[in-house]
Amino acid sequence: MKRLFFKGKGSKNQINSMAGMWSFFASVVVVGVFLLVQINGYDLMTCLFIIVIFFGVKLVGIQNVLSNSALFRRQRKMILLNVLEKAEDKEPLIDIVEDKPTKRLSINFPFVIMALTGFVAMAVRFYLLKYDNYQLSESWFNELTILKGVSQQNWLSNDTGVVGQYALMTFYEKMTGISPEITLESFGILQAFILSFIIFWFMNTITGSKITVPLMTTLSFAFFFNLVPINLSQITHGKETLMALTLVLPAMVYILKPWLLYGKSPKNYRYKIFVIFTAIALIDVYSLIVLIPPFFLVAPFFISKKRMRFYWLALKAYLLATGIVLGGYAFYLYQEGADFLQFIISNLLSVTSSTYTSNMMLPYDDLMRVVQIISLVAVLVMFLMMKSKNDKWASLIAFIAYVNVLILISFQNYRYFDHDLLNEILPVFISIVLGIAFYLIMYLFVTQVKKVFMPEGFAVILIFVIFASAAFFGQKNLFSKEEPTSRLSKNIIAAYQEISSGFLPYSYAVVNSNTLRPLSTDSHNFLTYRDFLGEYAVRDSVYFANKEDKEFLRANTQYIVPNSLLVFIYDITNEDDFIQFAVYLDLTDEVTERMNKLRGKGRTIRVFFQKGDLTVYEIVNNPGEARINELL
């Protein structure tokens, strides 16, 4: 879309352009959703209107939009006259100039590889979905409630955590048209893609390597799960720390290399870095308070005097963003009578995050020692080669020093330092440290031993084969220990997605276990199995006895039945799968019998969804009144 609407020549460094657009415009989306929610203006049409206006301005040019010059007024009149003339002559209003599509929309080889690594990370996470046991858990339902709350203009009503990530999730939901349930399930996979290309760009920027080192670093993150503590059953779940990291890593680069952010206008730096820090504050307090300050302490030692003014601008922007966001939360919590300090603590300690060391090749302490030894050797070698703070080695040393500061802090056993949250981001940091070590080894070999030339395409294939083989043969035991989870939860979510995409909201009702009631919130009416067997039978009889008596129904709306009723029936042969859903399996026969009675009364009953242990029946009360395609 940038190539289509943004004026000017396309960027030669497409990787840097893509990452720069993500860091700034993703931050704008988070801040924009936050502001729209505050004025009860967050919905799909508002988002589309703002997007159309934005791209229209970018296409015309902001200078032309704001210009009041005589020249631009004359240009506008000429355009209007031209349109009127073509309309009278019945000619096309827009002149079409044929051009080679590759000229404007072409992409270079490094960009293709960056995108490919992102898709690889997505594919791996998609495969790991079969081990996911987070779906339809209590914490999953809590997240679904928060997600739906943002769409219902509720941001600060959640006094247990910040919801910036859910702002991005709702935007993703609205732009794609998928259900909140599918959004919650798929966002973690999308997050892996975003984080992969940010890692690729990060290594491309701080090392100068276009493909090989960024590719090895990104594949380390995408493929290897036995290097750091993880929870394999939750690895596909979207996490606030990782979402914030997609902005924290660019912010670190922009502190060390500010020209990458401000481009041709240094005046824009303070505003852009402020927006990024504000988004981080809205997404994750842990990243804001724990991850960023150590970098501000380390960075000044590796920034030249000429660039220090941008460091101070970044620090002021960070403090201002932190003050505004946390100050806003403090004011709200004070009005609600809640404890602001407890709010901060609850965001620094995660109840739902958990990591285990059983997957690791090395004991945790040994792994940290290995990282520290690699870091020490790499720093000593780079110090010997560094000639000034403008040198590329300065940025590499700064990041390695920063990672080791975090490791040292984790060893202090502070009361409010959550090791599980640190373990969530360790795969990224350790992958980058290993990537820097790879780069250093390659650099020393090429400069000190022998210069080796290898075609980029061949190098990419060789790296992919080596890393994929190492991951496959080195982690066989890891995956053999894990038991794939039941597909029932995935089938339930798939059924709800098909229902929400095919039916008009609130034109139908769902009959299901009360445990799954949150899936119906702000979407459709809900009946438990006991409601269906009890009161619904009365409603059905009264409604169809008086269906043509509009006055009676107007006066007794409690008897009006949904246009369609979708009944979830589970296979009772696999009772172990249903424990977490508290499904009343003893009622299944009664529900089936009641549907047979309704069929005998003339109701149309058809299978709407069937997969595995789940069958969803549709009871059609008013044909053509619930399904969107039938209404159209």
Image (tube, helix red, strand yellow):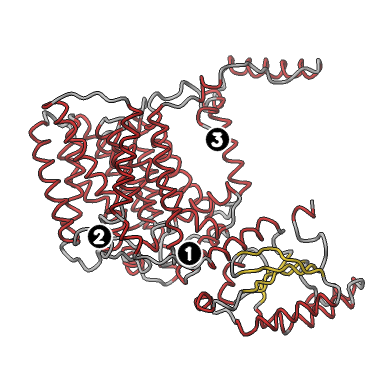
Q: Residues within 10 Å of mark 2 (few under 14, many from 20)?
A: some
Marks 2 and 1 in Cβ contact (< 8 Å) = no
> Is mark 1 in CB contact (under 8 Å) with mark 3?
no
Q: Secondary structure at mark 2?
A: loop
Amino acid type, residue under disc 3 in the picture: Phe
Q: Secondary structure at mark 1?
A: helix
Task: Give the camera-side residue of 417 and 615.
Answer: 615
- Residue 519 lies, with reference to residue 265, above or below; the image says below
Residue designated by label 3: 54
Q: CA distance from mark 1 to mark 3?
A: 31 Å
Tell me where residue 505 sits by quadrant: bottom right
Q: Is residue 255 above or below residue 619?
A: above
Please give left or right for residue 511 compared with residue 144 in the image: right
Q: Secondary structure at mark 3?
A: helix
Mark 2 or mark 1, earlier in chain: 1
Amino acid found under the numbered disc labelled 2: Met
* Front of the two marks 2 and 3: 2
Q: Residue 21, located in which quarter of the rendered image?
A: top left
In screen coordinates, is 451 left or right of 114?
left
Q: In which image quadrant can residue 263 be found?
A: top left
Residue 540 position within the rendered picture, expressed as x and y whole percent measured from the top left: 81, 78
Residue 143: mark in rendering? 1
Query: Which mark is drawn over residue 203?
Result: none
Which residue position holds label 2?
Answer: 360
The residue sitting at 33% across, 40% down in the picture is 465
